[in-house]
Image (cartoon, rainbow, N blue to C red):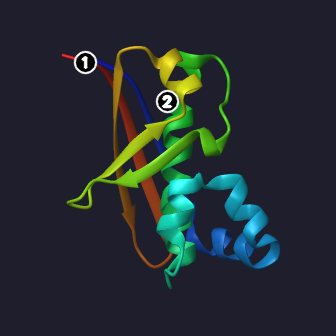
């Protein structure tokens, strides 16, 4: 049974501007350690960060009702399975509050925007 859905869309240019202005301070505020490792050496930094940002915002919007507060961006990481599928990795304090819920994520990019949807459901 679906418990919550979140959706977010962000302009890649907005993320590029934040990366240019704040650099690693911005990256460290948004991305967790595993995500920063994935970002390292990428040429499409703005697009990558925009996708991760959208995925985190989508999860946060869906979790608002479930958690009752807004967790920090770094407590939600989006990593990739070996086949490339993105999956959420929640910090223990977030995962504990989510109990037995699973969460799926889908991220999409084009040149100017990134979008993501998060769907929380009960484990079957």
Is 104 situated left or right of 95 in this image?
A: left
- Relative to 65, is 28 above or below? below
Q: Residue at x 59, y 51 (%)?
A: 32
Is 86 situated left or right of 1 in this image?
A: right
User: In which quadrant of the rendered view does residue 27 lie?
Assistant: bottom right
Question: Mark 1 or mark 2: which is in front?
Answer: 1
- Relative to 100, is 55 above or below? below
User: In which quadrant of the rendered view does residue 84 lie?
Assistant: bottom left
Q: Position of residue 86 (x, y in %)?
A: 33, 52
User: In which quadrant of the rendered view does residue 107 lie?
Assistant: bottom left
Mark 1 or 2, nearer chain start: 2
- Relative to 21, is 75 above or below? above
Q: Which residue is mark 2?
A: 62
Residue 9 shows in the view: no
Q: Which residue is mark 1?
A: 123
> Where, quadrant-wise, is the N terminus in this rendering?
top left
Query: Which is more toward the observer, 13 or 44?
Result: 44
Query: Which is more toward the observer, 98 or 2?
Result: 98
Q: Residues within 10 Å of mark 2 (few under 14, many from 20)?
A: many
Q: Position of residue 52 (x, y in %)?
A: 51, 57
Label 1 secondary element: loop
Q: Residue at x 23, y 58 (%)?
A: 82
**Which mark is drawn over residue 52?**
none
Q: Position of residue 7 (x, y in %)?
A: 46, 43
Label 2 secondary element: helix
């Amino acid at each position: 049974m679906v418990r919550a859905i979140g959706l977010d869309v962000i302009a890649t240019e907005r993320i590029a501007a934040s990366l240019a202005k704040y650099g690693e301070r911005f990256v460290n505020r948004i991305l967790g350690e595993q995500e920063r490792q994935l970002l390292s050496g990428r040429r499409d930094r703005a697009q990558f960060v925009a996708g991760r940002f959208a995925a985190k915002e989508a999860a946060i919007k869906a979790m608002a009702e479930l958690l009752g507060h807004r967790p920090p961006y770094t407590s939600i990481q989006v990593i990739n399975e070996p086949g490339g599928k993105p999956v959420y990795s929640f910090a223990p304090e977030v995962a504990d509050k989510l109990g037995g819920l699973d969460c799926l994520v889908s991220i999409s990019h084009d040149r100017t925007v990134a979008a993501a949807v998060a769907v929380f459901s009960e484990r079957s």
